[in-house]
Image (cartoon, rainbow, N blue to C red):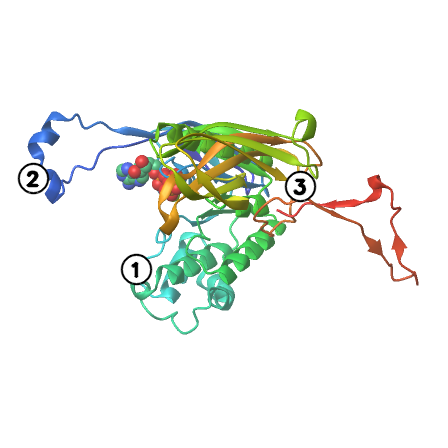
Amino acid sequence: MSRSQAALPGSVSATHIWKRYRPDSRRSVVQETLSAIRRRQRRRARWVLRDVELEVQPGEAVALIGLNGSGKSTLLKVLAGVTHPNAGQLDIGGRIGALIEVRSGIHPDLSGRENALFYGTVLGLSRRQVMDRFDDIVDFAELSGAIDRQVKFYSSGMQMRLGFSIAAFLEPDILLVDEALAVGDVGFQQRCLERMKDVLNQGTTLIFVSHDMAAVEAMCQRTVWLDDGVIRSDGPTADTLGRYRVGLEEKAALLARLLDDPVRMTQLSATSIDEALPETGRPLLLGLTLASEMSGPVDLCVGVSEGPATPIFTLTRSVDLRVGENDLRCTIENLPLPKGRYYVWLGAFGPGGSTQMPWHPAAPLDVEGPPRHPPPRGVMQLSPVHVTARWDARGSESTSFQREPTDGTAAALLSPR
Ligand SMILES: Nc1ncnc2c1ncn2[C@@H]1O[C@H](COP(=O)(O)OP(=O)(O)OP(=O)(O)O)[C@@H](O)[C@H]1O
Ligand SMILES: [Mg+2]
């Protein structure tokens, strides 16, 4: 492996990166007890990053997504030089500021103030340069009352605030941020997004790891999907998120088919009227057949989602099921979704909340229509909803409203997500 610093400030070039972790040689009490069994198992090193290639230009904002354990934090650690790859070439331009997992880079026995000084020195800043930014760091992290306390006595949210604030205010050329939003309260999450936006506007490169799709969409035009240590997709955020969501929901649908519940979905159709393809603003007819081993009332819940288990909307209806096949129809008058791929989710719950059919993705739903509009940078939109709107504008030099022509094509289409 080689690591070079000759690259342009803010650029990242990682080629053919391989990283392997050996199994832990220390044995837990349980492992000692089960040593006879353990001896029979071969203890193999595991490849956590496999031939990873990542080229990032100065000033670019790239998100890194993937399931738990897919290697995102490991890749950030490799880029930050916290850990070394077994093979590959790294060319990193300039200074890196990193918040990788809540605690890394933060020393528990040092106070918040000492951590800021220590980290600044690691970044190559003088004590004076750190002190110039110190008030901003403390103000942003809202830690003025705790900055001289040892960090081990901070809550996890306070540690994250300190780590993010240090990394983001010491003006690195490249900012690596790993799940900064996960333990922050809502107000702090929004301020983190604002800060990342400011840092990007100053020309810093951002590599942002998050499980929060709305945050990824709000920050990054480009997204890389890491799947079990391999890059599965690298491209515009909408494309990569689309593939990732479909992958997640197909996996969940596959698992659901293996379940053996009292009520099961055996057929589902989703069309517009006259069997046409589902379309924005038009009626959506859902036809479903449920095979039931029980009779009696259930609350049937139908939802549409573009992310795992988090529906954009749900509809619930009490139905009386018979043993055997039950056909149901549901008409949604005006489908409020912009163009895209979604999933229909279903669940059936008996009196008292007992689960007769678990909440699961039942079938994909492709919607034709106007595309959705990406949010402005730093703004998180939670669900795509199609809203038709007309704008009336009055400029400072005009005394009357200027209404857009009222034909259909002039209606502004707003698609908050
Ligand atoms: N120091 C280590 N020693 C051994 N295995 C490790 C070590 N660090 C990480 N791993 C393993 O490497 C794999 C990737 O871990 P990593 O932390 O990079 O995942 P991640 O994508 O960041 O996951 P998450 O979304 O949960 O944060 C996991 O299987 C993990 O157990
Ligand atoms: Mg991680």
**Which is closer to the viewer, label 2 or label 1?**
2
Tags 2 and 3 touching, CB below 8 Å: no
Q: Is mark 2 within 8 Å of ligand 1?
A: no
User: How far across and down, in percent of the image, does residue 341 sit?
Assistant: 58, 32
- In three-dimensional space, the C-alpha distance between marks 2 and 3, rounded to whole angstroms, equals 62 Å
Which residue is found at the position 14% from the left and 43% from the top?
28
Q: Badge 3, how many Cα within 10 Å: few under 14, some, many 20+?
A: few
Please tell me whether mark 1 sits on a helix, a strand or a loop. loop
- In three-dimensional space, the C-alpha distance between marks 2 and 1, rounded to whole angstroms, equals 33 Å
Mark 1 or mark 3, which has the lower sequence index?
A: 1
Please tell me whether mark 2 sits on a helix, a strand or a loop. helix
Per the image, the residue denoted by label 2 is 33
Compared with 13, 397 (above or below) is below
**Which is closer to the viewer, label 2 or label 3?**
3
Compared with 235, 414 (above or below) is below
Per the image, the residue denoted by label 3 is 333
The amino acid at mark 1 is Pro
Q: Badge 1, how many Cα within 10 Å: few under 14, some, many 20+?
A: some
Compared with 404, 147 (above or below) is below
Per the image, the residue denoted by label 1 is 108
Mark number for residue 10? Answer: none
User: How far across and down, in percent of the image, does residue 77 sit?
Assistant: 38, 41
Mark 2 or mark 3, which has the lower sequence index?
A: 2
